[in-house]
Amino acid sequence: MKNLNLKKQERSYLKLNRIILTVVFAIITLVLSTGIFFVPLALWAFATVIAAVWLLYWLLFIYQSAEYKHFSYTMDDYGLYINRGVFWRKKIIVPRNRVQHTDITQGPLDRKYDLAELIVHTAGTRNASVKLPGILHANAETLRKSLSFAESQDAV
């Protein structure tokens, strides 16, 4: 693979994932904290559980940063290239002539940040669909049109 212009996920995607993670762990902490009043355990036991929960939070927070750092993608005449993975790195190549159709999905929070997830469905059974999350909606549309154009060129 020659030197390609690799693109990253949007920074707002990382921010959105961190907000969701923080809210989930705040709710977990709140629920566990109310247990102090109803469950007859020592205060140190609750403190230990809450500390373990927040240690897990920080590990996931750091993992999200590493995942964001190691995710990139690009498109050329041959197809779509995706690099991902923190511990196990994965390089995915989706040739244009294998693309069957594409989908773009957006949740309510994605719409607020103008983010989308491009799903590329390919011919084959293993990894028959490839997801490209955390990109701008306009970029997803551009990639979709580019892949759809290649699909129409290969029609019988």
Image (cartoon, grey):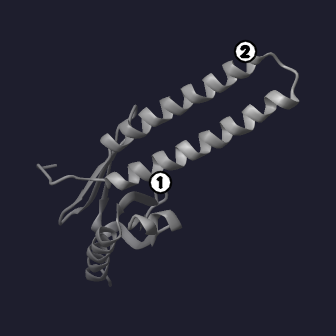
Residue 122 lies in quadrant:
bottom left
Apparent side of residue 88 relative to residue 58 in the rendered image (left or right): left
Nearer to me, 28 or 89: 28
Apparent side of residue 22 relative to residue 115 in the rendered image (left or right): right
Residue 117 visible somewhere in the drawing: no
Mark number for residue 24? none
Nearer to me, 78 or 143: 143
Residue found 69% across the figure and 38% down from its top: 30
Residue 44 lies in quadrant:
top right
| Coordinates of residue 39 in the picture (x, y in percent) | 86, 27
Label 1 packing within 10 angstroms: few (<14), some (14-19), many (20+):
few
Quarter of the C terminus within the rendering? bottom left
Report helix, strand or loop for mark 1: loop
Type of amino acid under label 1:
Arg
Task: In the rendered view, tell whether residue 27 sits above or below residue 113.
Answer: above
Type of amino acid under label 2:
Trp
Q: CA distance from mark 1 to mark 2?
A: 49 Å
Residue found 49% across the figure and 48% down from its top: 19
Report helix, strand or loop for mark 2: helix
Residue 104 lies in quadrant:
bottom left
| Coordinates of residue 102 in the picture (x, y in percent) | 41, 72
Residue occupied by mark 1 = 126
Residue found 61% across the figure and 23% down from its top: 51
| Coordinates of residue 28 in the picture (x, y in percent) | 67, 39
Residue found 30% across the figure and 82% down from its top: 152
Label 2 packing within 10 angstroms: few (<14), some (14-19), many (20+):
few
Residue that protrudes farthest toward the left in the picture: 3
Residue occupied by mark 2 = 44
